[in-house]
């Protein structure tokens, strides 16, 4: 019985056992290691993933979680070690071989064709046909059913470029669940999801378990891990700390194992109280099609949160305020009336903006780290026609230390960093301009 038929339903399936009464691992990794030149990013990883089991992988940014998932799903080959599925040795030279073997990967990053429809993306490379003609009607119907099952309201006819980042992630999840897989790997699946969408995703994960599907679940959100994980593997600096029963670990236990030291608290205490001095005041802000008549004030030392469902217009509102899209608003910065015609004008005025789409709008993935860091502060590092490469390199070294950016070398490209370390680089880039207001 397929996942497509069952994922929205209840109940489970009977799992077969081997002669010793224990379950045969769907996937077994033995002494996996990955090296890039002289740098070892993953060392001696051994684990079993059982049918009907949710096995979480946790660790700090740069611990090797995403590298491990890429090894297991055929995106990179191990330097050392072996893989087996259901007792048979396997080697994956490319992702399609892992998929054919029964492994699906839901990526942390959005890997969809923006110029195609949602339906086209779901069936890309596995289109249905009626005779010699592609069966668009059936694909749209199946796409609508799958999207409804996972709680995604986006239209199957919509172009991916026109849907929100969170909905794109849900489309990726739907694509991974179209076929029958033995193992589904979720790599930070809830990073761009709201509370309701997270709940729906966790329901899907638990139903996969109920139908005997093995699940590998990577997340920084320890509350999610605590809720669903049967086992927890902890990675630190590319090495295994250990494998633990999920139900016996508290969030504090997991955090201590991840960092390798005692922690007084999961989150630092706030010591500074906000003042009465208004820093940014926005009145009657409107962004056509997204937000209307929004007003707020944020004070010095204050953290002002904006909540809302996906599609509520939060991102578009602030893109309008900083000049990324057409908008109307009365804006005051430190008591002075101002209008941002472009993000450059906002940066020059002292307003930093950290985009939610770090790969599409935040970083140049094929460029080195130093230019990415200093791109918003070119006037400081490259005044006139001079090229301040030494100052740029010094700034990168300081940022790597201050933000604990894990990397193979200072000459690496932004795309070679893990997702979490890319986010650190992006934050360092925003704060390098010394803003008085930061929009995250």
Image (spheres, rainbow, N blue to C red):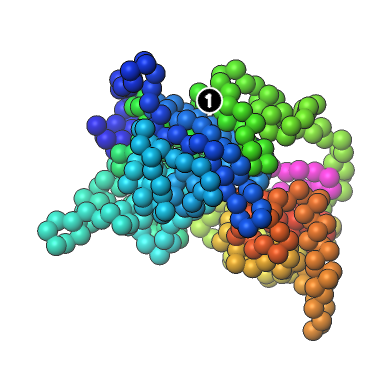
In this view of the protein, which residue sits in the foreground, 440 or 113? Answer: 113
**Residue 141 screen position, x and y as percent:** 25, 47
* Residue 183 in sight: no
**Residue 105 screen position, x and y as percent:** 44, 45
Determine the residue located farthest toward the top in the rendered image. Answer: 21
Q: Does the magenta stretch include residue 305?
A: yes
Q: Is residue 347 above or below residue 49?
A: below
Q: Is residue 86 above or below residue 437?
A: above
At a point 40% along the width and 65% down the height, the residue shown is: 115
Q: In which quarter of the image is residue 174?
A: top left
Q: Is residue 431 magenta?
A: no
Q: In which quarter of the image is residue 292?
A: bottom right
At a point 70% along the width and 50% down the height, the residue shown is: 406
In this view of the protein, which residue sits in the foreground, 34 or 213? Answer: 34
In this view of the protein, which residue sits in the foreground, 54 or 222? Answer: 54
Give the left or right position of residue 352, taking residue 59 as reference. right
Q: Residues within 10 Å of mark 1 (few under 14, many from 20)?
A: many
Determine whether the residue tagged by mark 1 lies in a helix, strand or loop: strand
Total number of numbered labels?
1
Residue that badge 1 annotates:
231
At a point 32% along the width and 46% down the height, the residue shown is: 100
Give the left or right position of residue 168, taking residue 218 as reference. left
**Residue 123 screen position, x and y as percent:** 31, 53
Give the left or right position of residue 419, taking residue 276 as reference. left
Give, as a single range, the part of the protein colored magenta: 296-308
**Residue 427 screen position, x and y as percent:** 72, 54
At a point 84% along the width and 48% down the height, the residue shown is: 300
* Residue 359 in sight: yes
Q: In this view, does 197 lie above or below 367?
A: above
Magenta region's main secondary structure?
A: loop
């Amino acid at each position: 019985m397929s996942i497509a038929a069952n994922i929205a339903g209840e109940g489970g399936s009977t799992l077969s056992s081997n002669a010793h009464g224990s379950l045969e691992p769907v996937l077994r990794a033995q002494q996996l290691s990955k090296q890039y030149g002289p740098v070892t990013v993953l060392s001696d990883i051994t684990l079993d993933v059982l049918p009907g089991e949710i096995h979480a992988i946790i660790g700090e940014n740069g611990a090797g979680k995403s590298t491990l998932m890429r090894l297991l799903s055929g995106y990179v080959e191990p330097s050392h070690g072996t893989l087996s599925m259901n007792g048979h040795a396997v080697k994956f030279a490319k992702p399609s071989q892992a998929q054919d073997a029964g492994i699906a990967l839901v990526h942390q990053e959005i890997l969809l064709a923006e110029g195609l429809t949602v339906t086209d993306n779901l069936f890309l490379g596995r289109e249905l046909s009626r005779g010699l003609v592609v069966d668009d009607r059936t694909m749209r119907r199946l796409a609508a059913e799958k999207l409804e099952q996972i709680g995604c309201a986006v239209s199957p006819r919509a172009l991916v470029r026109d849907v929100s980042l969170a909905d794109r992630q849900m489309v990726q999840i739907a694509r991974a669940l179209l076929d029958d897989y033995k193992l589904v790997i979720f790599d930070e699946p809830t990073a761009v999801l709201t509370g309701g969408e997270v709940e729906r995703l966790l329901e899907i994960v638990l139903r996969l378990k109920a139908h005997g599907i093995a699940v590998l679940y990577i997340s920084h959100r320890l509350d999610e891990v605590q809720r669903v994980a049967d086992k927890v593997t902890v990675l630190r600096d590319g090495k295994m700390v250990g494998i633990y029963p999920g139900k016996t670990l508290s969030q504090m236990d997991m955090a201590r194992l991840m960092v390798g030291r005692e922690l007084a608290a999961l989150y630092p205490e706030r010591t500074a109280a906000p003042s009465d001095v208004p820093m940014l005041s926005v009145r009657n802000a409107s962004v056509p099609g997204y937000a209307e008549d929004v007003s707020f004030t944020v004070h010095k030392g204050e953290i002002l949160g904006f909540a809302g469902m996906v599609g509520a217009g939060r991102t578009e509102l602030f893109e309008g305020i900083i000049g990324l899209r057409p908008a109307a608003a009365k804006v005051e910065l430190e008591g002075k009336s101002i209008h941002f015609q472009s993000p450059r004008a906002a940066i020059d005025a002292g307003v930093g903006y950290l985009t939610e789409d770090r790969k599409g709008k935040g970083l140049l993935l094929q460029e080195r780290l130093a230019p990415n860091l200093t791109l918003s502060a070119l006037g400081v590092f490259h005044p006139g026609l001079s090229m301040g490469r030494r100052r740029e390199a010094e700034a990168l070294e300081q940022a790597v230390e201050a933000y604990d950016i894990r990397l193979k070398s200072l000459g690496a490209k932004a795309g070679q960093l893990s997702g979490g370390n890319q986010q650190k680089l992006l934050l360092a880039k925003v704060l390098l301009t010394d803003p008085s207001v930061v929009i995250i």
